[in-house]
Image (cartoon, grey):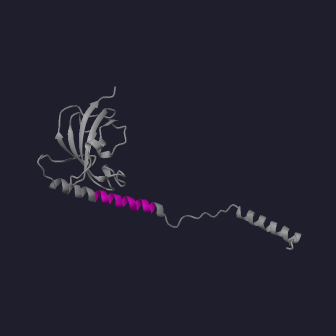
């Protein structure tokens, strides 16, 4: 048979008092403010920005060299735009250019710099959008502002104007510059 052990009442009360005193001392307001020794997060962000900027500069230089070396049967040069993309007109006309809030229908073929097709026009499909109010890659949106109905262009998109650091999470990897064959099928002004 087990003998039961009882604490003397004095020890029990003193234990409760000690626990209560410790709890109260832990809740006291302290006037000491500790500041961080290093600001690691801001250093990390700054370093990441520097790395991204350097990568973009290197990619621009590479693409400038690529454009200068590019020759094909079309004999049409790429023109650099203010938005950082290169454009080459395959079929150009004098129609009015698409504006923000216009309804634009277009299709595209996406290729690597080695001309390997990533997405055919059939895979890409026809996109019907309101210009300036959709979520497409920056380079295509920038180009649509320069085009009118019936025009066909070839775009050279640096990765930061294409799918950037993450790719499209399907067929396009991270930091991949692209060639986009873009065709404007229709442009209608918003009524």
Q: Main secondary structure of the magenta part?
A: helix
Q: Is residue 126 above or below residue 165?
A: above
Q: Residue at x 83, y 69 (%)?
A: 14
Q: Is residue 133 above or below residue 71?
A: above
Q: Residue furthest top?
A: 191
**Rendering quarter of residue 95:** top left
Q: How many marks?
A: 0
User: Percent from the top left, x then y, of residue 63?
Assistant: 22, 55
Q: Is residue 189 above or below residue 169?
A: above
Q: In the rendered view of the protein, which quadrant contains the N terminus?
A: bottom right
Q: In the rendered view of the protein, which quadrant contains the C terminus?
A: top left
Regarding residue 130, the answer to whether it shows in the image is no
Chain part drawn in magenta: 42-57
Q: Is residue 107 found left or right of 91 in the rendered image?
A: right
User: Percent from the top left, x then y, of residue 71?
Assistant: 13, 52
Does the magenta portion include 54?
yes
**Rendering quarter of residue 99:** top left
Which of the two residues, 174 or 53, is positioned nearer the viewer here? 174
User: Percent from the top left, x then y, of residue 78?
Assistant: 18, 48
User: Percent from the top left, x then y, of residue 11?
Assistant: 85, 71
Q: Is residue 152 above or below residue 15?
A: above
Regarding residue 170, the answer to whether it shows in the image is yes
Q: Residue furthest right?
A: 9
Q: Residue at x 30, y 34 (%)?
A: 104
Q: Residue at x 37, y 54 (%)?
A: 166
Does the magenta portion include 140?
no
Which of the two residues, 98 or 113, is positioned nearer the viewer here? 113
Q: Is residue 178 found left or right of 168 in the rendered image?
A: left
């Amino acid at each position: 048979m087990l003998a039961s052990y009882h604490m003397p009442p004095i020890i029990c009360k003193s234990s409760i008092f000690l626990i209560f005193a410790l709890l109260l001392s832990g809740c006291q307001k302290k006037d000491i403010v500790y500041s961080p020794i290093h600001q690691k997060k801001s250093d990390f962000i700054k370093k990441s920005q520097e790395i991204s900027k350097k990568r973009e500069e290197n990619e621009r230089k590479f693409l400038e060299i690529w454009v200068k070396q590019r020759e094909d049967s079309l004999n049409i040069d790429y023109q650099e735009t203010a938005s950082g993309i290169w454009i080459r007109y395959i079929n150009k006309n004098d129609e009015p250019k698409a504006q923000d809030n216009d309804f634009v229908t277009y299709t595209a073929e996406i290729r690597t710099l080695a001309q390997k097709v990533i997405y055919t026009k059939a895979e890409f499909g026809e996109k019907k959008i309101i210009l300036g109010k959709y979520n497409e890659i920056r380079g295509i949106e920038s180009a649509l502002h320069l085009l009118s109905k019936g025009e066909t262009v070839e775009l050279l998109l640096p990765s930061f104007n294409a799918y950037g650091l993450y790719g499209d999470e399907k067929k396009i990897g991270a930091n991949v510059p692209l060639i986009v064959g873009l065709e404007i099928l229709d442009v209608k002004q918003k009524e």
